[in-house]
Amino acid sequence: MKFGVVVFPGSNCDHDMYHVFSEVLGQETVELWHKDTDLKGLTKDDCIIIPGGFSYGDYLRSGAIAKLSPIMKSVSEHAAKGGYVFGICNGFQILCEAGLLPGVLLQNAGQKFICKNIYLKTTTKNSVLTQKLDTNTSIKIPIAHADGRYYIDDAGLENLVKNDQIIFQYATEGNELSNDVNPNGSVSNIAGICNKGRNVFGMMPHPERASEDVHGNLDGLGMLESLVLG
Amino acid sequence: MNSVETKVTVEIAQKLGLTSEEFDKIIDIMGRVPNFTELSIFSVMWSEHCSYKNSIHWLKTLPKKGEHLLVEAGDENAGLIDIGDGMACAFKIESHNHPSAIEPFQGAATGVGGIHRDIFTMGARPIASLNSLRFGDLDNPHTKKLVKGVVKGISHYGNCFGVPTVGGEVFFDKVYNQNILVNAMSVGIVKVGETVSASADGPGNPVFIVGSATGKDGIHGATFASADLTENSADDLPAVQVGDPFQEKLLLEATLEVIKTNAVVGMQDMGAAGITCSTSEMSAKSKTGMRIDLDKVPTRQKNMLSWEILLSESQERMLIVCKKGQEQKILDVFDKWDLECEEIGVVTDTGFIEFIEKGEIVAKVPADPLVLGGGAPVYIREYEEPAYIAKVKDFDIDTVKEPNDLVATAKELWKLPNLVSKRWVYEQYDSMVRTNTVTTNRPSDAAITRIKGSIKAIVMTTDCNPAYVHADPFTGTMIAVAEAARNIVCSGGEPAAITNCLNFGNPYDKGVYWQFVNAIKGMTAACEKFKTPVTGGNVSFYNQSVSKDKTEPVFPTPTIGMVGMIEDYRKSMTLDFKKSGDKIYLLGKTRNDINASEYLRNVCGVSLSPAPYFDLEESFVFLENLGKVIASGLVESAHDISDGGLFTNLLESAMVNNLGFDIAFENNIRKDAFLFGESQSRAVISVSKENEAQFMELLSQLNFDFTALGIVKENTIKINNIDFGKLSSWKTVYENTLGEQLD
Amino acid sequence: MKFKALINIMPHKELLDPQGKTVKKNMSHIDIDHVDDIRIGKRVEMILDAKDTIDATNKVETACKKLLANVIMESYEYSISEI
């Protein structure tokens, strides 16, 4: 699988995503510039990464301006053809704003930026991202966001559950869901979801920050390797 | 006010912050009375902030040479050290105290932006930032507001800019109630030979302004930064600058890209005094001149006056001198990143900076007399020991009663704002972006950042206990350097160099100047001993609280930002206890000393006492030996003893992995001094049983002073068989106290 | 008596509004060109008890000055009506 990392003005995890896919996982990886519509030869079997950061300064609303960039048209077309799209943090916000994923990410309940390790429960193995993960064991992944409170109305939530679209939830180290460990007030502790077609993914936590020996934490590597397997 | 209409007199000069002698000197230099615009140029360039007129004489005495140094202090925007493999590390710390006291969010944000710009203007990519913050009494509602604003400002700017905030310190004392200190440090890396200088060589080369448009914000900021802060300062609207981290992120990427085109001759960031400072400093450095057409400067507001354009401190702007004929390369890069990039003038050989508006020269000033190291005034101020020092020397430990109940005393100490976890603060900073932070899951005394593509890492810390410096500026500053070095060594690194941020009161106050001079002397002594030259930094005077009847300076606060190296990040050392049964050793000599400790000042309520025991030679030998002990690979953890003493140190190592300890000691030192005293040059290490024999042998080879304290033990906190209760309750207080006060 | 106050808080016009500037720059993405300026502020709606209009005005003024607006960075204006 080839990877294309979109670079928006204000993206700041673009280098990190490029590094983890090309250097750590040894995959062919290209950068995609926001003003272009060219996907540099990526086919529907490949994956577009929407990285974290503060695209357009997160001004107005996180992701609101980025969704209008020329590259996003190509990303939507890629997704419509069944190609993989994976948004992390700001990338998740952009995919929601662009309508490629349901719901919206609101300001954290505590109204502060939070950067810390949290634990995730893998809710389903039924996705290319989680197929190799263990739903019975939590993984420790860092979060770093100000707008991470996932919100969707009741009907939407029901659909997510019915279609098995919730892929990650904030949990205790012991893999239990609890309000106490919900860092941002997300509905149902939701940390990551996929679309109905199961080819577009978004999550707030940063697996690339837990994927090398230097991080002292390899819990993020599993899902990235899982994605590489396709 | 208009430059044409305003008649220049000595009164006007004084209003701009110049003295009458300085005004005479200007007339002498110019050979005529300057017009208002020219006078404004002098006023900002000769302000304390730009000229260092009251400090430069002493700054020149600091040690500046070292084997790793690639540029000497003051030569470039920031210091540069060789880190091997063809790479160099650029780093600097800077204050943004007065703007943060007025508008904490924007003040702190633009402070972070300014220091990063200093680093990337040299061609280095910032890879880490740190900050050192001093606030007033935490019980004061105004302090809470300032803490929230400053932290949010740093968080907003740093997180968006995409550079991890990996370390720092927060200190509370009522002396900072009105005048907080916000010191921000940036560390970047660059390939040797790919740095860009702040020079304007080659007459005929075009000059560009890039980044943001110029607006009326921050006008006279440089002058403002040099004037006493009064209760009315909040009305001084134009001093506020608004930061745009998004714009700065684009400017960073564009800058690093434009350097690769080889079309750049020189580049300087626009900080204090904006266009004026950058044009004069670049011209003076290259012994050239510049002719700038102010009509070509992109402005945010219509009809800005010439002096407003010249003095504006609008953020996220830079001045670039380009090779003639290669203009298009520069235009293309900035166009790609959607940034303003306008050719506004040309390098000349006249030695003058000339500003033109509507075809006419509105100001023409020789560059050299404006700048530090050129003709800017240099003052050597008088100083004398302030009266409080006599009271400091009078302190006698025997007047402090030893506590009967150590547990109760420890609890009292443990909840002090200076000792509790700063988690509420640092969790608001993105500490992991760029995926190089080693210390996220491996806590150390200093922050460690890997250099991508290698196993090398940079180790960084900021340190200064201002209470020590207040008690004894000479010793206190030596301690600040020594503590920084100890933090680097405890993390497995080797100290390389420092940058400093010298926060003091009014230099015209003889007592304040005495503090300043002695701090410089202490820094010199310690930096020479530890072979950590001073690569640069900044001076911030006039940090004081002004009320109707008196002026109270803040504690003298010479913040030390130290950078060191680790050849292999896998060999970095952590501070946390690893497993039950490991042996705990105290290295170094403990004295019967509670001087200037948190315990003495904030539990016993004694505000004046000497600095804690410190001997430079002892500290140096200690550090050499500690480095050898850590490098031996025989120890499981190492943690420097600092604020809060041994007791705080042990709990900090215990809490990480929820392990406790059982220790006992017997000596002729007061128990409070042993547990809570802050005598210097000490650290605690833990060793596994398997390595203990070999470790003991090493200690005896090194002739290292040590005390065997006890063992790491789960679910236990026991000292001399006294049960100190559950670790979890100590941890709860530690983790939550600050948040409870601030949320 | 109950009053409703509508308060508009805007960044001072002399100061940079990074948000407004960025939004303005990107209006072209939705094919709206020639936008001269965009500045982005906040609107606050407040319902309060007061003796009379003067009392209500005093309270709203105090709220704006001391809490709702950062007067160093922002200016405010309001209208008050009885409900």
Image (tube, grey):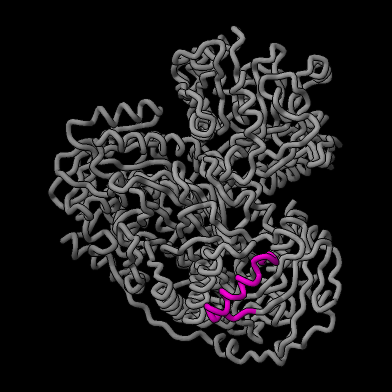
Going 80% across and 35% down the picture, which residue do you hit? C47
Question: Do we see residue B642 in this rendering?
Answer: no
Nearest the viewer among A142 and B37 is A142
In the rendered view, does C40 fall on the left or right side of B379?
Answer: right
Farthest top residue in view: A81
Nearest the viewer among B155 and A164 is A164
Nearest the viewer among B367 and B719 is B719
Q: Residue B664 in the image: state x and y as whole percent.
A: 77, 78
Residue C8 sits in quarter: top right
Question: Do we see residue B577 in this rendering?
Answer: yes
Magenta residues, start to end: B687-706
Q: Up-down: is B483 above or below B249?
A: below
Residue A79 sits in quarter: top right
Q: Residue A40 in the image: state x and y as whole percent.
A: 44, 15
Magenta portion: prevailing SS class: helix
- Residue B548 inside the magenta-drawn segment: no
Q: How many numbered callouts? A: 0
